[in-house]
Image: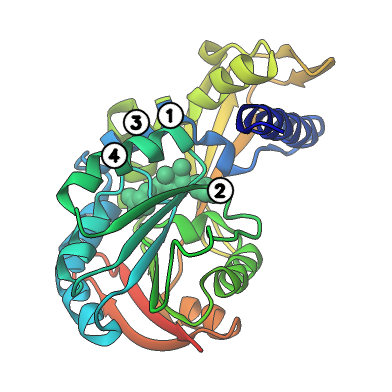
Amino acid sequence: MSAAESAGESGRDERAEFLRDALAGLSGPGKSLPGKYLWDETCSDLFDRICAHPDYYPTKREMALLPQVASEVAAIVGPRVSVVEFGSGASRKIRTLLDALEAPAAFLGLDISGAYLEAALRRLAPDYPDVAMTPVVADYSKPVRLPPAAAEPPILGFFPGTSIGNFTPEQAGGFLARARETLGPSHFLVGADPTRDPGRLRRAYGEADGLMAALHLNLLDRMNRELGSDFDRDAFRHEARLADDPFRVEAHLVAIRPAAYQLGGRTIRFAAGETIRTDTSHKYAPETFRALATAQGWEPIRLWIDDDSGFSLHLFRAG
Ligand SMILES: C[S@@+](CC[C@H](N)C(=O)[O-])C[C@H]1O[C@@H](n2cnc3c(N)ncnc32)[C@H](O)[C@@H]1O
């Protein structure tokens, strides 16, 4: 099979899976979709703008912590490291790490938003001519194998931001176990956000001048474009809701009025006020997150906590 045929086939498989998950998530009451389907190029662009918005505290707090963390991590992991970033998106934070590491050998950016990832690595590569750059288009909610020879030991995994919080605690355990398989003997630097201040969370996840709403409403456009549905984005509004046990922020699209839409040959009905949960952000206290990772065989090495928000970066090791 040619490369073009095999790319076409994998695109068809992905669309079939998207349709299956969309029908399963939207057919009954308690409608929801896995957050990974938010991430097309438009969403990645919007997220990049959200990171620069004053309301979105996680990026700013993590960036404030990262220079110190990066130099301490560099001393721990030593020279010629291959760095593997999960969900690398615009690949901005990696610069701080690459700048601090001693002669890093390789960078593998792994992301589900393929075209955006490839463009980000094309922008990054000229600034790091001695670092071998490999984009890996993959879904990290499933097992991931790195391209052979692209990442030689020593290996440093990097999962910054609040992305680990998009998994339920059980799913996060599964991700951490899979990451051990993917990375092999390695260090792993992971961000986790413990914020519980309702005002701060509502501003970050609900406002940001409408950028968050645009990011979530884009999912309806994406389904219309890729799955042939007929959702009307003007008939929904975005809302961030706080929930407990475990503490989390949920993103919902709320139907403004009763409506019915077509998806994959089925009718999807909404009562006024009914919602689609489009993403979840679990907030992990450092000790809770450390226990979760330890249970998956990651040995805690070092923890850094931001004074202002409590945003934490954990360094783990697996032998
Ligand atoms: C919230 S953004 C974080 C981007 C960047 N790492 C940061 O910290 O600013 C999440 C990134 O993970 C990617 N992503 C989300 N779900 C994914 C999945 N299941 N597999 C691979 N990448 C995923 C998105 O495309 C996006 O680039």
| Residue occupied by mark 1 | 41
Label 3 amino acid?
A: Asp
The reply, left or right, for residue 263 in relation to residue 78 is: right
Residue 113 marker: none
Q: Is mark 2 within 8 Å of ligand 1?
A: yes
Quick check: marks 3 and 1 in contact, CB under 8 Å? yes
| Residue occupied by mark 3 | 45
Residue appearing at x 25%, y 69% in the figure: 104
Label 1 neighbourhood size at 10 Å, few (<14), some (14-19), many (20+)?
some
**Under tag 4, what secondary structure?**
helix
Q: How many marks?
A: 4
Quick check: marks 4 and 3 in contact, CB under 8 Å? no
Q: Is mark 3 within 8 Å of ligand 1?
A: no
Residue 47: x %, y % from top left: 35, 37
Residue 269: x %, y % from top left: 77, 19
| Residue occupied by mark 4 | 122
- Work out whether 72 lies above or below 209: below
Residue 144: x %, y % from top left: 60, 59
Dot 4 or dot 2: first in sequence order is 4
Label 3 neighbourhood size at 10 Å, few (<14), some (14-19), many (20+)?
some
